Image (cartoon, helix red, strand yellow):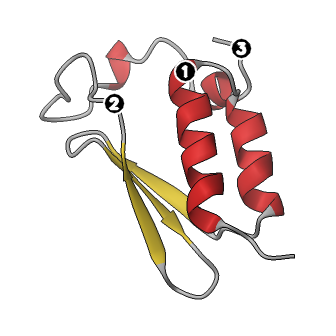
Amino acid sequence: MTTNWKDLARATLEGSESGAMTFPQSLRILIEASFDGYAVDLRRSTRTYYMPNGETIELETEPTPTPVAESFDASLNPSPPSDLQHGRA
């Protein structure tokens, strides 16, 4: 099977941003395609996907609607990240 890495990365990004795809669905697609992982940069509005051959794909994301804080404040976090990832928040 030939993997079209950029199409899969773009599909998960678009699904995530539109709300058409849950976090677990997005991860399943990336794992099944053998991506090594991805990183989201909220300040730069980018998502970088890491492929098993060491190459990366960087895609632009929608800008964050509120500015990113200068420092992390745990008291402002409404629920643990695991709740968000599992659709419980």
Crowding near the residue tagged with mark 3, few <14, some 14–19, many ≥20 C-alpha atoms within 10 Å: few
Check the picture and name the quadrant holding the C terminus.
Answer: top right
Give x and y (percent) for residue 55.
49, 82
Q: What type is the residue that disc 2 sits on? A: Glu
Q: Which residue is mark 1?
A: 18
Locate residue 72 relative to residue 25 in the image: left or right. left
Q: Is residue 26 above or below residue 89?
A: below
Q: Is residue 56 above or below residue 32?
A: below
Give x and y (percent) for residue 77.
41, 18
Give x and y (percent) for residue 78.
47, 11
Classify residue 45 by image quadrant: top left
40 or 6, which lies in front? 6
Locate residue 15 relative to residue 26 in the image: left or right. left
Q: What residue is at 70 percent from the left and 41 percent from the top?
A: 26
Q: Which residue is mark 3?
A: 88
Q: Assess whether mark 1 and mark 2 are in contact (beta carbons under 8 angstroms).
A: no
Q: What residue is at 54 percent from the left and 40 percent from the top?
A: 13
Crowding near the residue tagged with mark 2, few <14, some 14–19, many ≥20 C-alpha atoms within 10 Å: few
88 or 6, which lies in front? 6
Say what secondary structure mark 3 lies in.
loop
Crowding near the residue tagged with mark 1, few <14, some 14–19, many ≥20 C-alpha atoms within 10 Å: few
Q: What residue is at 64 percent from the left and 81 percent from the top?
A: 52
Q: Which residue is mark 2?
A: 62
Locate residue 40 relative to residue 11 in the image: left or right. left
Q: Which residue appears farthest toward the bottom when viewing the image?
A: 53
